[in-house]
Image (cartoon, rainbow, N blue to C red):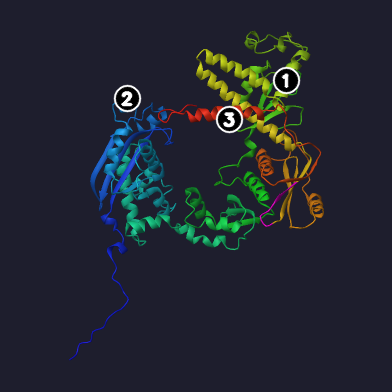
């Protein structure tokens, strides 16, 4: 009997390296930090807690309080229970960091919202001259968002996940307790991904970099989207807008939402709800940007953060009455009043109003005064802060001088207010009343920045019609018609074509605008600012300017805004790295 021998040629035996590192053999260091704030450049660490595990067994722990080098804000103490007294005798980060780096040597790091904790560790290493850790990092928050759905957990907060996985430790914003709870969450998540074929550390890290199952399942929503400028709208099953965006290439932008490059948690959550993606093709990139702003303001999609409430801005109004005053209002009315704004909040508007009152003795009471009926003056008159037209000591004509100065300061020259507040700041600083001087600085900044912004808006909104063009990348020209700061038409002129017919046709079909009152008579301030940014880009050509002159006041607030901005830049440059930040 003969024995046949067969040989298999060209097949190599796999090595252990090809298989990867089994998760059971990986040493994880699950850690958590407590800090005095959210900025790793401005705030300090108050506590470090870490648990070393391998094969499901705890093999070591690391825990210490840390002196952050400055006071702990009260709300942080309420949240964590860590007080200034507790860290008074604790070691500084310079003493703790070497021991922690030794504890994590050769291990895979795990944290819940790892970018936050790793940011503080890397900042500490940079500050002390150590190289940043090169350990592999696993983020349990990111992993949970990929593995769990909203039917299982309403969110991916650590406390929620600890309850879901029945952790033996309840997290309560103390570093070691939170690290122990994160260990149980990690083990629970590893159990879930094991059923998806994830058995090695390499598999686990690759799984985190993959698109989520929802992203892969919804990828068909990007089909049929053209490679053109425009606006895209993610809609739910009822057709309500979830998110509105714009792009110069709709196809590439929409497709990116269904790839691993899209890592924003809120956007991934939105993709899970979305049932369709609607698109609107636009002629130019500027038209797409303007349409996006208008649609966000009109539909208020829940997953858009900015531009949702353009109607919530406030204005500082110099009223039109016998004895005008400065009033904070929300609506622009055609009643002869003069406006300064828009402001993002009533608090900022009140700061600007206080700055103006420092320079101008306008009345601060809210009653409507009569030039013939008098009453007793208030304390402000005795302090020289008001001309007291209420008791007849100042005539309507004399008071009108201050009103004219206020109107001039709002629309043309901010120098009067700037000089008055600056003199008060100098006086307070000479008396070493620095905190009061800082309050006046912020009030002056609110006034100057808003005045500069409004004067820039007015430079465009007062022009009845402007036609401008910009060169496109392929030699074409993007042409836009702007009326009172509102984009009313957009089109593309092919390279080499005669411009007159295209411009005439675009002007003839442009939206008709009936301007309203105030500095923004036809569009939101954000829309007009978007157009102004486009007009500032290189290569813009003004084709027509009708019904006004595009110019800024010679002594406007813009010349003073630079001084304000430089002051704040200097303040940030000298901001202390530890402890409570300066306002």
Quadrant where the N terminus lies? Answer: bottom left
Q: For the image shown, how many numbered marks are present on the structure?
A: 3
How far is mark 2 from mark 3, CA to CA?
38 Å
> Taking the image as drawn, is residue 113 in sight?
no
> Where is mark 3, residue-wise?
565
The percent position of residue 350, horizontal first and vertical second, equals: 61, 25
N-terminal of the two: label 3 or label 1? 1
Which of the numbered marks, if any, corresponds to residue 405?
Answer: 1
> Taking the image as drawn, is residue 122 in sight?
yes
Stretch in magenta: 468-474
Relative to 112, is 440 on the left or the right? right
Per the image, label 1 sits on a secondary structure element best described as helix
Q: Quadrant of residue 212?
A: bottom left
Which class describes the residues within 10 Å of circle 2: few (<14), some (14-19), or many (20+)?
A: few
Per the image, label 2 sits on a secondary structure element best described as helix
The percent position of residue 432, horizontal first and vertical second, equals: 50, 14
Rendered residue at 53%/56% (across/down): 256
Which one is in front, 475 or 285? Answer: 475
Q: Are marks 2 and 3 in contact (CB under 8 Å)?
A: no
Per the image, label 3 sits on a secondary structure element best described as helix
The percent position of residue 258, horizontal first and vertical second, equals: 51, 57
Relative to 562, is 65 on the left or the right? left
Which of the numbered marks, if any, corresponds to residue 85?
Answer: 2
């Amino acid at each position: 009997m003969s024995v046949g021998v067969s040989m298999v040629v060209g097949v190599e035996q796999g090595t252990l390296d090809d298989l990867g590192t089994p998760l059971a053999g990986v040493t994880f260091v699950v850690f958590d930090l407590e800090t005095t704030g959210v900025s790793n450049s401005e705030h300090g660490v108050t506590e470090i807690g870490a648990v070393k595990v391998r094969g499901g067994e705890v093999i070591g722990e690391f825990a210490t309080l840390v002196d952050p080098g400055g006071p702990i804000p009260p709300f942080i103490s309420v949240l964590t229970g860590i007080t200034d007294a507790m860290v008074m005798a604790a070691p500084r980060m310079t003493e703790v960091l070497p021991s922690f780096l030794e504890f994590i040597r050769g291990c895979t790091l795990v944290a819940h919202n790892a970018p936050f904790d790793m940011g503080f560790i890397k900042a500490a290493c940079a500050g002390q001259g150590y190289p940043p850790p090169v350990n592999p990092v696993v983020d349990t928050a990111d992993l949970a968002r990929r593995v769990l759905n909203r039917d299982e957990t309403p969110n991916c907060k650590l406390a929620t996940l600890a309850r879901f996985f029945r952790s033996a430790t309840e997290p309560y914003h103390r570093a070691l307790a939170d690290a122990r709870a994160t260990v149980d969450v990690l083990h629970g998540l590893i159990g879930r991904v094991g059923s998806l074929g994830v058995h090695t550390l390499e598999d686990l890290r690759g799984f985190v970099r993959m698109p989520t199952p929802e992203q892969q399942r919804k990828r068909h929503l990007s089909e049929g989207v053209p490679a053109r400028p425009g606006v895209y709208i993610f809609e739910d099953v009822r057709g309500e807008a979830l998110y509105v965006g714009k792009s110069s290439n709709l196809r590439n932008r929409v497709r990116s939402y269904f790839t691993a490059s899209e890592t924003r948690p809120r956007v991934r959550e939105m993709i899970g709800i979305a049932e369709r993606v609607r698109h609107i093709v636009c002629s130019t990139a500027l038209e797409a940007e303007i349409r996006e702003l208008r649609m966000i303001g009109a539909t208020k999609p829940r997953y858009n953060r900015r531009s949702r409430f353009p109607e919530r801005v406030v204005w500082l109004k110099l009223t039109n009455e016998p004895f005008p005053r400065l009033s904070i209002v929300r609506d622009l009315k055609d009643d002869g009043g003069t406006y300064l704004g828009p402001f993002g909040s009533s608090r900022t508007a009140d700061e600007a109003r206080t700055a103006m009152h420092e320079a101008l003795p306008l009345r601060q009471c809210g009653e409507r005064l009569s030039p013939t009926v008098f009453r007793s003056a208030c304390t402000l008159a005795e302090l020289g802060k008001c001309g007291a037209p209420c008791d007849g000591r100042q005539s309507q004509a004399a008071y009108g001088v201050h009103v004219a100065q206020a109107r001039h300061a709002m629309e043309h020259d901010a120098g009067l207010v700037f000089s008055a507040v600056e003199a008060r700041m100098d006086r307070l600083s000479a008396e070493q009343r620095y905190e009061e001087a800082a309050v006046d600085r912020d009030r002056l900044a609110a006034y100057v920045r808003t005045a500069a912004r409004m004067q820039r808006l007015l430079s465009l909104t007062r022009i009845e019609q402007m036609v401008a063009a910009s060169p496109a990348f392929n030699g074409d020209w993007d042409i836009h018609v702007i009326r009172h700061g509102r984009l009313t038409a957009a089109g593309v002129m092919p390279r080499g074509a005669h411009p007159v017919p295209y411009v005439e046709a675009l002007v003839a079909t442009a939206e008709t605008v009936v301007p309203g009152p105030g500095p923004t008579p036809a569009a939101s301030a954000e829309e007009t600012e978007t157009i102004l940014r486009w007009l500032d880009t290189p290569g813009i050509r003004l084709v027509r300017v009708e019904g006004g002159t595009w110019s800024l006041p010679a002594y406007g607030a813009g010349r003073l805004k630079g001084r304000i901005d430089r002051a704040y830049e200097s303040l940030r440059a000298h901001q202390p790295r530890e402890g409570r930040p300066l306002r």
